[in-house]
């Protein structure tokens, strides 16, 4: 999934990587996040995916960062789904907030490794083994995607 936007759930509880003493040289105290994921880089990632014949596999979506380390309850998955979340994880967002704060253009991508359990009749449960296996299964695909993407990004990409 190419990350279109995020929800920083730990941020709602006051956990934010920008909390603490303000270092003026890195960026503003109150940075905007409405442009956290660069539009041109998102378009490029989708185009490169299409070029490689992976259009069916790649979608844009909203990533929600949760504190973890447990996987979600069914009620949590249902709540997040109703909030417009497409995928959940326990990482990525703190790095994106810090990068955006320093003025870097960000492209975020997340490999969706398992289905959220949304049904009380389901016997399925999330498992770290499944997550790691899905990562291994997609390694070649990701390697191709990232290699071509990096080639297509202009060398002066971060200069505004
Ligand atoms: O990469 P994400 O945000 O999914 O991170 C979580 C944290 C663990 O590395 C792993 C758990 O399966 O995914
Ligand atoms: N929070 C969360 N992180 C994940 N990382 C990989 N799969 C999952 C999941 O189902 N939930």
Image (cartoon, rainbow, N blue to C red):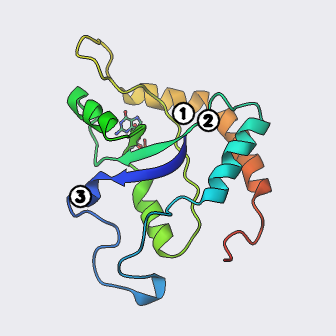
129 left or right of 47? left
Occupied quadrant, residue 151: bottom right
Residue drawn 47% across the image and 82% down it: 26
Marking on residue 12: 3
State which tag comes first along the sequence, 2 or 1. 2
Residue 114 drawn at (x, y percent): 44, 27
SS at circle 1: helix
Marking on residue 135: 1
Q: Nearer the viewer, mark 2 or mark 1?
A: 2
- The CA distance from mark 2 to mark 3 is 29 Å
Q: Residues within 10 Å of mark 2 (few under 14, many from 20)?
A: some
Marking on residue 58: 2
- The CA distance from mark 1 to mark 3 is 29 Å
On the rendered image, what quadrant is the N terminus found in?
Answer: top right
Q: Are marks 1 and 3 in contact (CB under 8 Å)?
A: no
Indicate if the residue with disc 3 has its beta carbon within 8 Å of ligand 2.
no
SS at circle 2: loop
Ligand 1, by image quadrant, is top left
Q: Is residue 74 above or below residue 143?
A: above
Residue 36 drawn at (x, y percent): 49, 62
Q: Nearer the viewer, mark 1 or mark 3?
A: 3
- The CA distance from mark 2 to mark 1 is 15 Å
SS at circle 3: helix
- Give the camera-side residue of 88 and 91: 88
Residue 104 drawn at (x, y percent): 57, 70
């Amino acid at each position: 999934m190419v990350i279109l936007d995020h929800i920083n759930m730990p941020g709602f509880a006051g956990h934010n990587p920008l909390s603490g003493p303000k270092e003026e040289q890195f960026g503003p105290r109150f940075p905007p996040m409405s442009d956290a994921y660069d539009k041109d880089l998102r378009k490029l990632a989708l185009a490169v995916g299409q070029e490689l014949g992976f259009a069916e596999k790649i979608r844009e979506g909203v990533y929600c960062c949760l504190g973890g380390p447990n996987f979600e309850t069914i009620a949590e998955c249902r709540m997040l789904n109703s909030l417009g979340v497409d995928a959940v994880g326990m990482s990525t967002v703190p790095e994106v907030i810090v990068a955006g704060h320093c003025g870097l253009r960000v492209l975020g991508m997340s490999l969706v490794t398992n289905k959220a359990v949304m049904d009380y009749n389901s016997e399925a449960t999330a498992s770290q083994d499944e997550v790691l296996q899905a990562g291994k299964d997609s390694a070649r695909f990701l390697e191709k995607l990232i290699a071509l993407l990096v080639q297509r990004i202009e060398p002066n990409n971060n200069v505004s």
